[in-house]
Amino acid sequence: MSFFGFTEGIPQFIRDHPYPIGVATALGAIFLSAVYIYKRRRSKGCLDPTEFKEFRLIKKTQISPDTARFKFALPTPTSVLGLPVGQHVLCKGKDSDGEDAVSPYTPITGDSDLGYFELVVKMYPGGRMSRNFMELREGDYLPVKGPKGTYKYKPGQVRAFGMIAGGSGITPMFQIIRAILKNPKDKTKVHLIYGNRTANDILLKEDLDGFAEQFPNRFTVYYVVSEPSGKWSGGVGYVTKDIIRAHCPPPAFDIQILTCGPPAMAKVVTAHLNELGYTEDMQFDFNRDGIFYLLF
C-alpha cells in the first residue's frame, strides 16, 4: 500500500502492516515525554540549597604560587550544576582544630558546561577553609551546597557593566563575563578594572585577554598593579576615581557597577563611585553576600 501516495523509504513491515502506525505514534509521544522529563531533571541541576553534596575533584591546576584551578565532576557527563549566573556555592572542610569550616566560592563555569564545574581558589596557609584546598588531591571529594547569594544576572538587564575587582574577587565577575560573551544574543558591554599587587598575581589573565581579543566591541579589561616590575604597561598604584572615570561607563539608568575585592579596597572604591555620581541602584558589591569576607 502507499501512504499519501508514497512508498519509497517506508519500512517493509509498516507497508505490510499499516495498523502499527498508531502504536508508532504512541511510542513517539512516549519518547518525547521521556526527553522532556530528562531535560527537566537535567536542568534542575545537582546542587541542593539545604544539604551539602560531595563532588569529586578530577583536575587541579596551579595557576599562581598561591592559587589553583579546581575541576570537579558532576554525576553524569550531561549533568549541570544548576547555579544561576551571579550566584555562588558554599564549600565545607575542617579548620586546624578539626571544626567545620564553611566559605563561599563562585564557580567560573556555568550551566552551559556539562558534566563538571570549576573553582579558582586563592589558598592561605592559615585559612580556615582555603587550607582544605591546599590539601585536596585529585580523586578527593568536596562537600558543596547552593545556590547562594542575592544577585542573579539576566541577559540584557543593563546596557553596560563596569566591573571593579581585586585579587580573587575576580571570580564572580568572570562568571558573569563568560555568560555574557558566550551568549550571542546578549549585547551587554562589559568594562573590567582588575587590581592586584603584582602582575604575577593576576588570575585568569590568559582567559581575560582572550575575551578582549575575541570580543573587542563587547569586552575591555584594564589591569592595575601596586608593585609593577619589568615592562609593565598597565595601571600603577590603586584604583582611583580617574581610573574609574576613564574605564567604566558613566552614571546612567541602564548601567551597573559591580565590585568585589578585599574589604579595604571595596570601601575606597564605593566612596569613589559615590563621589562620581553613581547612585546606590547603580552599584552592587558582592561583599554583601560575604564572597570576600569569608574566603579565608
Image (tube, grey):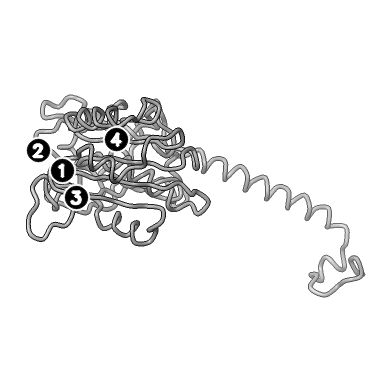
Work out how far the residue at label 3 is from the one at label 1, CA to CA, in angstroms.
19 Å
Q: Are marks 1 and 2 in contact (CB under 8 Å)?
A: yes
Q: Amino acid at mark 2?
A: Pro
Name the residue that disc number 3 marks. Answer: 202
Which residue corresponds to mark 2?
Answer: 125
Mark closest to the chain's N terminus, 1 or 2: 2
Helix, strand or loop at label 2? It is loop
Nearer to us in this view, 17 or 32: 32
Q: Nearer the viewer, mark 3 or mark 4?
A: 4
Packing grade of label 2 (10 A; few <14, some 14-19, many >=20) is few
Question: Label 1 belongs to which residue?
Answer: 134
Q: Are marks 4 and 2 in contact (CB under 8 Å)?
A: no
Cα–Cα gap, marks 3 and 4:
16 Å
Task: Inspect this view and state whether residue 188 appears.
Answer: yes
Residue found 87% across the figure and 68% down from its top: 16
Q: Give the percent coordinates (x, y) of residue 80.
A: 45, 45
Q: Mark 3 against mark 2, which lies toward the viewer?
A: 3
Question: Of 181 and 91, which appears nearest the observer?
Answer: 181
Say what amino acid the circle numbered 1 marks.
Met
